[in-house]
Image (spheres, rainbow, N blue to C red):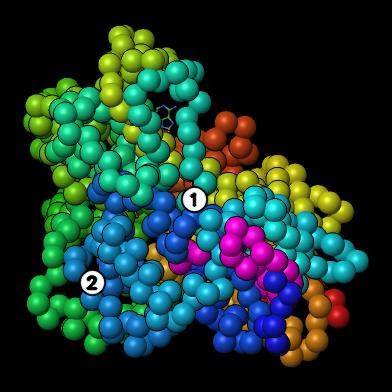
Amino acid sequence: MPAALAQAQSGGRSIPRTVDVVVVGAGLSGLYMLHKLRAQGLSTVVLEANSDVGGTWYANRYPGARVDVESFGYSYSFDPDLEQEFEWSERFATQPELLRYFQHVAERFDLRKDIAFDTSVTSAQYDESGRRWQVRTERGDTVTTRFLVMATGSLSAAKMPEIPGLESFRGVSYHTAQWPVEEVDFTGQRVGVIGTGSSGVQVIPLIAEQAAELTVFQRTPAYALPAHNRPLRPGEGTSAKSDYPAYRKAARESGFGVPMEPPTKSALEASAEEREQAFEEAWQAGGLTALVGTFTDIQTDLDANALAMEFLHRKIAEAATDLQTAADLTPQYPFWSKRPCLNTGYYDAFNRPNVRLVNLQREPLTEVTGAGIRTSAREYELDAIVYATGFDAMTGSFTRVDVRGRGGVSLQEAWAAGPRTYLGLGTVGFPNLFMIAGPGSPSVLSNMVVSIEQHVDWVSDAIAYMERRGLATIEATPTAQDEWVDHVNVLASYTLFPGTDSWFLGANVPGKARVFMPYAGGVGAYRQKCDEVAASGYAGFQFSS
Ligand code: NAP
């Protein structure tokens, strides 16, 4: 299809007025989507709110940010030369290294020329008669497109907490997911961090090293598992890269998108010695999934889970030297019933004299004041506050754009009782709209790169299928969507996830429907289902010609 398009001048940059595909977001999903669509001869523009590529890795540039899947696995597999040429330096790559990787990808495939940066999409409206989407940006551009791909990320809509007085603080406030590009120096400052999820667990040790005083405001403690991060040894990269074909295949067929031997035994059937050995080996191996992968029932049975909890509680008690602090850092909810975190120096930070932990379950946070943070017990004076308070996860990046499908119905209205999708790829009432790693797909329960590549491949194949047959629109059928939503719920009900408040359930956003959003059946089973759907001529989707 010719890419010669009418151009609208906006902010000094040309944005085409009409394209085959608009992709929203130039993160992991958007970059690969652009590369694929371009290869198919489709005119494509990527609209990106940030000033450069990287998506979540562009925005989350707080100190300590690093990936919690091993670097070799957290990388694209679509190009064998790309796989071989990039040199990772640590077991778990830091945010600056990940950003360098995405910049390298953008340059290598000459992607930037079709990306409009600093271009925030405000709305997308489906025009039923023309069967086109009208996409509008904050800068006033309108782009008409056949297909709309929301590559907006599962964890990109930053969430500030509902605490009175936020605006009154006279110091400087930061959100981990909206970190400034300029370096932030906390030297000599009194810093408060609210939040002890993955972002808090990563940023706290680094701020502790710099600040004069660090006060951590913790509402719910995290299970922080050892990363055992380290620089890669000479030759380690070459050897890992030579195994890539087998490694990628195993990742695609796995549960979490990382190669793993599935467990065969129940924790309840194992002897105490066997359990201790398995847990200890997993602890020594490090990583997010080793421990939950020791036995078949850690994630599904409360009694089995309690055995893992007891092991973890002992580890936390050993790590934090102050008894009260250790007790406060110990989670009481089942392990992996909300997402655990990867620890690089987290518990050690609380052994430093300049760090104190405030247990908000004992002294609830009441307000932010001009001078700092007040709890029911006292006021803590601060120079800076870091909100590590997470995201409106999985749906926020879609619903923050005013997306309106057939009949002018907004995505927000359609999903008022929780997101409804078929395969996490499409949703009824929104023809030709694709989601990458949408709710109802494994996304956040997996190595995101594995899930994203699978979705991008599936979407580009579906568009190619339509092009070959001269089909104008694709849309999920209500029956297929209802059945898929039920299936996703049934899978979640086999796990311990629904019993603990978490962002997986939307519990961190007041008023958000409590629905477990990701697909918990594993990336292997999910891929198989998506492949079957495609092979059958896209069963569960309807086309118009
Ligand atoms: P999060 O897991 O949602 O954690 C937010 C933290 O803020 C929680 O401790 C929460 O407490 C606390 N909080 C929220 N509102 C509060 C309030 N009003 N008062 C006091 N505390 C409040 O967010 P996150 O740490 O940004 O992580 C989100 C997800 O992003 C992770 O689970 C992970 O999937 C991903 N992530 C990945 C990496 C990585 O790959 N390395 C790094 C960062 C994030 P409650 O638990 O009590 O609500």
Sequence-earlier tag: 2 or 1: 2
As drawn, the residue found furthest toward the bottom would be 468
How many marks can you see? 2
Q: Is residue 310 left or right of residue 54?
A: left
In this figure, which residue is indicated by the disc labeled 1? 156
Predominant SS of the magenta segment = strand
Residue 234 rendering spot, x and y as whole percentages: 9, 77
In this figure, which residue is indicated by the disc labeled 2? 88
Q: Is residue 535 left or right of residue 225?
A: right
Kindly identify the amino acid type of the residue bearing the numbered disc 2: Trp
Task: Determine if the magenta segment contains residue 16.
Answer: yes
Mark 2 to mark 1 CA distance (whole Å): 25 Å
What segment carries the magenta color? Answer: 8-28
Q: In the image shown, does 298 or 434 lie closer to the viewer? A: 434
Q: Is residue 284 left or right of residue 542?
A: left
Tell me the residue at 75%/44% (across/down).
Answer: 413
Residue 515 rendering spot, x and y as whole percentages: 59, 44
Residue 218 rendering spot, x and y as whole percentages: 32, 28
Residue 4 rendering spot, x and y as whole percentages: 70, 83
